[in-house]
Image (cartoon, rainbow, N blue to C red):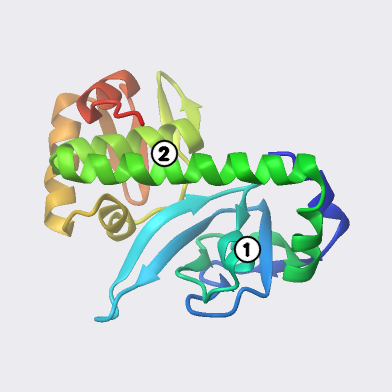
Amino acid sequence: MGLEEVHEHGRRARFDAGGRLLRERGPGEEVALILSGRVKISHTGREGRDTVLDFRGPGELVGELAVLDAAPRSSSVTAIEPVEALLVAASDFRALLGKPQFALELMRLLTERFRDADRKRIEFGATDTLGRVCARLAELAERYGEPDGTGLAISLPISQEKLASWTAASRAGLANALRTLRELGWVETERRRIRVVDLAALQARAGNIQN
């Protein structure tokens, strides 16, 4: 996304792993552009359960919806590793919308995210746990995979608990799926590390649902 104009505004801030950049139900007073590190987007339900919605990395914008509609934030943004971000005040961000190119780029970004959300909802209703795990691992490999021999090592520091939440699966369901994928030779796992050996197989099992 062409976010060059954003760099002319805001202030830089650093967050340790576990640090909260933006808080759920908080006011939309600023947006954050991730400069380095990765964050998780999550929602806390009434019972206090934390549901992972997505991950964001360098060059990606977070918190823009609450600024656009002036409603309380529907999710939190938390660093999962040391993060540096540019925090831009809502008034400055809204002023940028007066620039046609910026507005078009933001519209493209939001459309892409809404399509991705629709695709995930379709996946949750149309595939089993193994298919959803394959879809999420394929996505992680495409976004954060680093060449490692004949495979791709997912560099995102993600626990099985977070992966299970993102996949809408139980811990036991995720463990069974990963065991199956290891037996098939499609992935290799270590503590907080997943190596995708056969990306094409994961994509095929996931169904490559498009919208």
Residue located at (68% from left, 39% from top): 1
Numbered circle sitting on residue 68: 1
Q: Quadrant of residue 198?
A: top left
How many numbered discs sit on the rendered protein? 2
Q: Quadrant of residue 211?
A: top left
Q: In which quarter of the image is residue 195?
A: top left
For label 2, the SS is helix
Residue 60's place in the image compared with 88, above or below, is above
For label 1, the SS is helix
The foreground one among 105 and 151 is 105
C-alpha span from label 1 to label 2? 28 Å
Q: Name the residue under label 2.
A: 140
Q: Where residue 202 appears, x then y in whole percent?
A: 27, 27
The foreground one among 91 and 189 is 91
Side of 82 relative to 48 (left or right): right
**Callout 2, which amino acid?**
Leu
Q: Where residue 36 appears, x then y in whole percent?
A: 67, 52
**Callout 1, which amino acid?**
Leu
Residue 142's place in the image compared with 16, above or below, is above
